Image: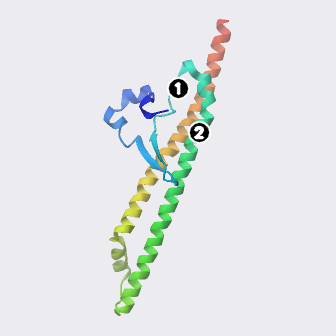
Amino acid sequence: MPLQNIKIPKWVNEHLPPDLANSKAFKFTITLSNSQKIEIDLFHDIDVDYDMLEHQMERTPAQLVYWGAILSEVKCQVAMFDRRADSRKGFLVDSIQQIAKKDNLKMTDKQMVLLIEKDEDLIRLEEAVVKLEAQERKLYYMVEAVKMKADMLRSLAGFKRQEREQTS
């Protein structure tokens, strides 16, 4: 479903200013491990339409699989970037120690940390980890929201079934 056709849940329209609802807090792009980009809208798939309960119940397992797969991709990227950052730190420590040894210098741990923390490549990697972790948390709660929606749909479908039985 194209993002421009997404039905915004009533609660969002009532409680969030439009500039916040349309911000990167709720809408962002994820680059998968195969370099494919996916637009994410956290309001997608969380609305409940009482008139379409059966249809929504049928779609919910697929939605859960979709959001779970996206969450898994982001978790994988977090781990990969975290590993790259650790590797960069190891490379920097080794390089700094070799230079210090060659120049016959002694460095304190604090000096080592200061030199490592100002490395631009390491800063970029650590910033990427932070951004990905934020996306991971958002997607985790999206998965939880779809699970809650499934529970709500089951309950509402039961009430709707009772209503039909009482009116027939």
Residue 161 position, x and y percent, is 66, 16
Total labels: the figure holds 2
Check disc 2 and report the residue beneath it. 64
Check disc 1 and report the residue beneath it. 48
Residue type of the residue flagged with mark 1: Val
Residue at the far bottom: name it.
Answer: 104
Residue 58 position, x and y percent, is 63, 29
Label 1's element?
Answer: loop
Image height check: is 30 above or below 121?
above
Image height check: is 112 above or below 143?
below
Way the structure is coloured:
rainbow
Asked whether residue 17 is in view, the answer is no
User: Which residue sits at x=53%, y=37%?
Assistant: 145
Q: Could you tell which of marks 2 and 1 lies nearer the N-terminus?
A: 1
Label 2's element?
Answer: helix
Quadrant that contains the C terminus = top right
Residue type of the residue flagged with mark 2: Leu
Give left or right: position of 99 versus 140: left
Give left or right: position of 155 versus 22: right
Residue 31 position, x and y percent, is 46, 51
Which label belongs to residue 140?
none
Mark 2 surroundings: few (<14), some (14-19) or many (≥20) residues within 10 A = some
Residue 46 position, x and y percent, is 51, 32
Image height check: is 13 above or below 27?
above
User: In terms of depth relative to the viewer, which is nearer, 134 or 36?
Assistant: 36
Mark 1 surroundings: few (<14), some (14-19) or many (≥20) residues within 10 A = some
Image height check: is 161 above or below 3?
above
Separation of residues labelled 2 and 1 (CA atoms) = 15 Å
Q: Residue 16, located in which quarter of the rendered image?
A: top left
Residue at the far top: name it.
Answer: 168
User: Which residue sits at x=44%, y=72%?
Assistant: 88
